[in-house]
Image: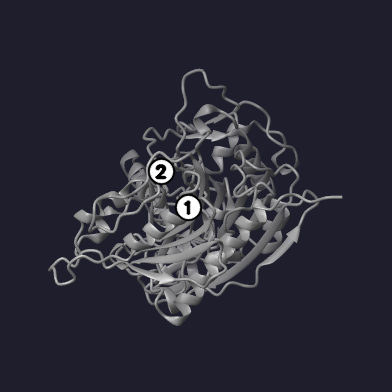
Amino acid sequence: MGEGAGDMRNTEHTEEMDWARDLFDGARGEAEPFWGADAAAISRAGDRRRRLRTAGTGGGLLGLVAVTTAVAVTLGAGTTDFGSAPGPGGGWGGRKLQDVFRYAQVDGGSGALGQKDFSQHVPRSAAVDLAALIGHLDPAGAHLLGSPAGPAREQPRIVGDRDSGLKDTMSLAMSSTWTADGSYPGPAPVTEPEGRLSYSFFKNADLLRGPVLSHGTVLPEPCGLAVDFDVHFGMLSGDAALPHWSPCRYTTLSDGSRIGTTSAAYGTGTETVAVRIFDTGNMVALSGWDFPRPDSSDWTVAPDPKTVVKPSPWSEAGFQAALSDPQIGPVFAPLPPRNADGKFLDPADIGPYWVYDPNQGPLTTGEFVMDNGCTPDHSIFGLAPGSALQYQGMLPGGFAGPESPTTALEGEYRLPAGTGPATMRAARTYASGGCDQAAPFGFSKDTVIELPAGIGDDAFVEDQPQMSRVRVYVRFGDTVLETVFSRPSVQPLDVTSAAGRTWVQGVARKMAEHWASASAPATGK
């Protein structure tokens, strides 16, 4: 995360250069965007163009999406500014909220795709949480520093939580620099003890679930959440030993929220992490380093012992106490409930690292794709809208090829009455591929993998190796369920091995179980 790195005694040029460098490093240090194929767009329209692809360009039809790394809050004139309002009691002492920026600066965040004006505005609840945390971690205001020019620099406005400009914001990140005497450090390289602290607010903890990968290796994450941005993501290309996190210790508070704490050594320094997860999925995270960011941003080199703060200003117990403050609360409106009627897959049905896509808006189906790239398009258009859910995660290398990010889309296709069996037979035919296998481009290598009887009324798998995609079909009457697994690169999902077949059969059975259970008539006395 970014930190204050200017020196008020230096020239304005030096201060601005250091400030810009830190913001750049801070952005670089955050979690890299999760890239995945937009399975919804592919299912709706992309496959109609499959006949145009060749073996060498099969991945070109994949639509890619990413979480942005800027604060997605565009606000209009007249927005209420809550900065002059008093903050919480306790260690903060009721000072005005705007004073939080003396001790912390905004680094960034994430929001909906397509937003371009990312002015810095902070929701009131985040400012209150920040004030409460600072009140615990630095009650005298003697150590933590915010933006490098101090309070004179123009600071973000504090606005209402439900301000229209905040509706698509998924996360917000802030950070502080810790120095022994509370004065701004000089330019890099750092030669005195210096620490850093980050505060992160997430709309949903699912944003941070799932493993981080480096060269096929799954990197450990504190409490199973990707919140240790700086050390972890800077080490991806190096050979330094990965941090060994202590067991995550979870405590449940009276409001039902849970606090998890863990820490890891990095050379003679320590990183401490704590998260508070609310029942809405909202999460507040603290990450503390008792050492500075290295000048080269090279996290393969342990911190210079002379720059490590001893004793450390952070501890798991201290972070837990700070996050337990009753003033700490959720910042963002909760995401709509996923799979409320239980008719679709649970993420755990797919694998241990899977979650509902936290960035997904409402999805519907209306086109049943049947196109193998060899014949005219037989897709069925204009269906009655059906529901759909999108997932993201990782598939183990043992049965699905090398580890890589994967997305899945499960949708229901509501066929015209009486057409279900015939449509499923046609889908099998077109899924079988074919064409001239001797052709230099190798069109349509799709194959059908039959599933055992008893999975719904009918079920099969379409393997699409050229598209790095697998489709699982299960029919109930005139409704077809389809789950599409896609990778963002041409990296086939191996479902032909024994382990692969077992996995894909398990997914199909779970699809059928959820649908049958949700569709069963309610019984009662």
The answer to which image quadrant residue 408 occupies is bottom left
Residue at the spot 32% in from the left edge and 66% down from the top edge: 432
- From the viewer's side, name the closer residue of 515 and 14: 515
Residue at the spot 52% in from the left edge and 60% down from the top edge: 226
Residue at the spot 58% in from the left edge and 61% down from the top edge: 512
- Does label 1 or label 2 sit earlier along the sequence? 2
| Residue 384 pos. (x, y %) | 48, 39
- From the viewer's side, name the closer residue of 115 and 322: 115
Horizontal arrangement in the rendering, residue 372 relative to residue 107 (left or right)? left
Mark 1 Cα within 10 Å, few/some/many (few <14, many 20+)?
Answer: many
| Residue 347 pos. (x, y %) | 56, 60
**Amino acid type, callout 2:** Arg
Horizontal arrangement in the rendering, residue 196 relative to residue 114 (left or right)? right
Residue at the spot 65% in from the left edge and 38% down from the top edge: 128
Q: Residue furthest bottom?
A: 498
Q: Label 2 belongs to which residue?
A: 9
Q: Secondary structure at mark 2?
A: loop
Q: Residue furthest right?
A: 525
* Mark seen at residue 420: 1
Q: Secondary structure at mark 1?
A: helix
The answer to which image quadrant residue 381 occupies is top left
**Amino acid type, callout 1:** Gly
Q: Residue furthest left?
A: 440
- From the viewer's side, name the closer residue of 48 and 220: 48
| Residue 4 pos. (x, y %) | 46, 47
User: In whole angstroms, how far apart are the C-alphas of marks 1 and 2?
Assistant: 76 Å
| Residue 510 pos. (x, y %) | 58, 64
Badge count: 2
